[in-house]
Image (cartoon, helix red, strand yellow):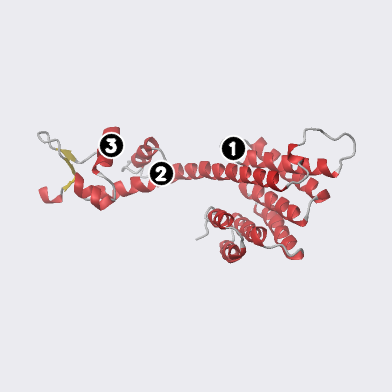
Amino acid sequence: MEDARLSIGQVARLAGVTPKTLRHYDRIGVLRPADVDPVTGYRWYRPEQVEQVRLVRRLRALELPLEEVRRLLSLLEPRESGDDGAAFRSALAEHRRRIDARVTRLRGILHTIDHLLTDSEGSIMADAVAVGMLDAETHRRLGAELFNDTWRLMELEDRSPADDVLMIHQAHASAYHWLQVGTAQNVARSHWLCSRVYCVVGRGEPALFHARLVLSTCQDHGIGDWDLAFAHEALARAYAVAGDPDEARRHTEQARLASADITTDEDRELLLSDLETIPHVG
């Protein structure tokens, strides 16, 4: 029985952590040692606990707080209900949804910054509201504002069904304004937003409709770089939502190939990281 025990130093080396980390896990109840010597206070662990420590490391790498890690580990303990890890997977899926909302929020910030950097007429900063027939500046301002507010709705972690409806309408309203005065690039990005919104609400057919328009707009106007890569990303995501994993994987690969032509490393990394969020695509 003594041979089956591992010291805290052995477990730390095998799991890739420090003894101090293991002591901390013990103090806060994340991972208790199998035995503690009542005289020396030495902590002893079972060999199978090495894998538990590695799992804690993996969960922490997912930006889960230790309190949540402790809860997730408790969900893996044997239960009479025999849920076979369903509760654990459900908790991870909920965390994934929160991370996805955070990513959406950050992409919305990037989009706003891009507008501020590239809009020479300063329509984002305009405070005046046009009266009567909309002029080009007002179309651009409303298109940008509706685009950004659609992102705001997508990033909500507790989005309601009513929010989903508003999000869809705002995406289309933004597209309408850009269709009036925008460049082909603006039009492509508007259809991309509509496709992403429909993916978020699980509507495969309209997501595909708009994703195809992104690609055709890029092809018809010779648009490459970021927009072409994200056209294939939109198609991959829409096909995944529509239940066609083969086409989803094909367009994921097309997006990766197109990423080679993205001019900046930061934008390329953004595209590649976004591809990792497409469900059911390996």
Q: Residue furthest right?
A: 132
Residue 162 locus on image (x, y percent): 67, 35
Instruction: Note whether residue 48 is visible.
Output: no
User: Circle 2: is it few (<14), some (14-19), or many (20+) Cα within 10 Å?
Assistant: some
Instruction: Note whether residue 12 is visible.
Output: yes
Residue 1 locus on image (x, y percent): 11, 48
Task: Please report the residue visible at 12 percent of the width from the left and 33 percent of the height from the top.
Answer: 38
Assign a secondary structure to mark 3.
helix
Residue 203 locus on image (x, y percent): 65, 50
Sequence order check, earlier mark of 2 and 1: 2
Sequence order check, earlier mark of 3 and 1: 3
**Horizontal relation, residue 43 to residue 76: left or right:** left
Residue at numbered disc 2:
88
- Up the image or down, 75 lies above or below 215; here it is above
- Residue 24 is tagged as 3
Q: Comparing marks 3 and 1, which lies closer to the viewer? A: 3
- Residue 156 is tagged as 1
**Horizontal relation, residue 138 to residue 27: left or right:** right
Instruction: For marks 3 and 1, give the CA distance.
Output: 34 Å
Mark 2 in CB contact with mark 3 (< 8 angstroms): no
